[in-house]
Amino acid sequence: LHGYQTNLWEKMLDFKKIISSIADVGKGILGKKFSEKRDLPTLVQLCDDLISYKGTASGIAIAREISEIYKILDKEQKLNFFLTINEKFKPNLKSIDEEISTYSKDKSKFNLDNLGNTIEGNRQELIRRMNMAPDGTSVLVSMREDLIDFSKTNVELKDFDQDMRHLFKSWFNPGFLRLERITWETKAAVLEKIIKYEKVHKILDMNDLKRRLQEDRRFFAYFHPVLADEPLIFVQVAFGDGLGKSIQDIMKPITGNFEKSNTATFYSISNCQEGLMRVTLGNFLIKRVVHEIQSENSNIKNFGTLSPLPGFADWFKNLSDNKLANILKNYDIAKVAFLKSDTVKLGDQRIVEEKEAIKKIVVHYLLNEKNKNQPLNPVSRFHLGNGASIEDVIINGNVSDYGYQESFGIMVNYIYHLNKLEKIHEDFASKKIISYSDKIKKYV
């Protein structure tokens, strides 16, 4: 037994020496700089190296150096980087034609794989290898934020953005994400970021945040294991008797016995990372949170939202009188003309006085104004795509500067009928049918 122990310790010591040697090599590779220059041509050359044989041997180190150089580029250099990489690594149409011809002659799995790789080009492979850097995922999310901005004026970059979005949909699949309930006991670093990222209803300070974390509220966020303490998207929920009708009421201190609440109102959903725009995390978040709330609170039977109406004010101000008259039919459009002026102030009584005509305009906007056969309003598009129904239009739902700037203080209740969710979603997705309540029907 003693001899066996001695032999085992000798083997363990040898193993430790091997591990130590690997660590030393790793430090050497990661510490190596492949060029003393930190400029755009060097960055492009490193990208070439990364997808070549060099990337196989020293991929982590090259990817890290690419990340470090990208961070110090100015805006113009970053744009030139994207334009250069986009052109250099985009799919080669001539090669695609050749691979199609080869596959047509011999429909083997090998030729099919070659065709697929040629169609994809090298942009996606470059992005995958860049993710090998120690902070690769974080840098790539930041890069896509820049790319989205550049794509607005450089349409040739949209394909590059599509490649990044395609990969992000896999990397940020909800199966990889961690759902956490945010409480007052959550790390201070996370709470500070939540204050920073809240865009719908601004959080003034820690005291304001504390109200949103009390026992009649629920606050959930998605996190990615690679991005420590960095919320990706979060949702805020208020319990009550029926759907919330005013953000000001929701923010008031606790009143009554909240334990008898029967409804959960989602009143704010915020994407924290601009680089993850259109990666569709929100719909998974809502469905997961519904499950969490149902598991915890059996009294909560109803789920809905108090949602903003971003862009409605701008849309209305650009509406022609002829179209407005057609929406309101025999109504005197002069009575709502004040909404196009600069005289609309917080709590403007004329909005209440003309609420029936204004609701009719809002309902038209929600049901009939489209972009590529989808609802023009992004919040409406999101909830309807999740299987929600338009429940009600709320006048003075958000009496704040932001609320009036975006929609004259108007908000919308959407409701999630859990027993009809899939049917409503399917009708909207395949037939473009928008579900709405009897309260809305009177304005159609």
Image (cartoon, grey):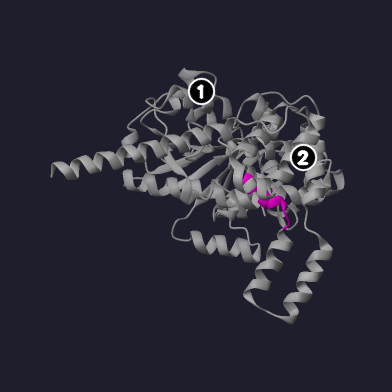
Q: Which residues are magenta?
A: 121-129
Q: Is residue 170 left or right of residue 215?
A: right
Q: Residue furthest left?
A: 1
In the image, 248 versus 151, the foreground residue is 151
* Figure quadrant of residue 271: top right
* Mark with earlier residue (2, 1): 2
In the image, 125 versus 234, the foreground residue is 125
Q: Can residue 316 be seen in this snapshot? A: no
In the image, 214 versus 360, the foreground residue is 214
Q: Nearer the viewer, mark 2 or mark 1?
A: 2
Under mark 2, the amino acid is Val
Does 154 sit above or below residue 125? Answer: above
Does 2 sit above or below residue 351? Answer: below
Few, some or many C-alpha atoms within 10 Å of disc 2 (few <14, some 14-19, many ≥20)? Answer: some
Q: Which residue is mark 2?
A: 44
Identify the residue shown where x is 64% and y is 46%. Answer: 55
List x then y, in percent, for residue 330. Answer: 79, 49
Q: Circle 1 sits in a helix, a strand or a loop, which is it? A: helix
Q: Residue furthest front?
A: 3
Q: How many marks?
A: 2
* Figure quadrant of residue 351: top right
Q: Can residue 13 be seen in this snapshot? A: yes
Does 423 sit above or below residue 43? Answer: below
Residue 398, magenta (yes or no): no
List x then y, in percent, for residue 354. Answer: 69, 37
SS majority, magenta: helix
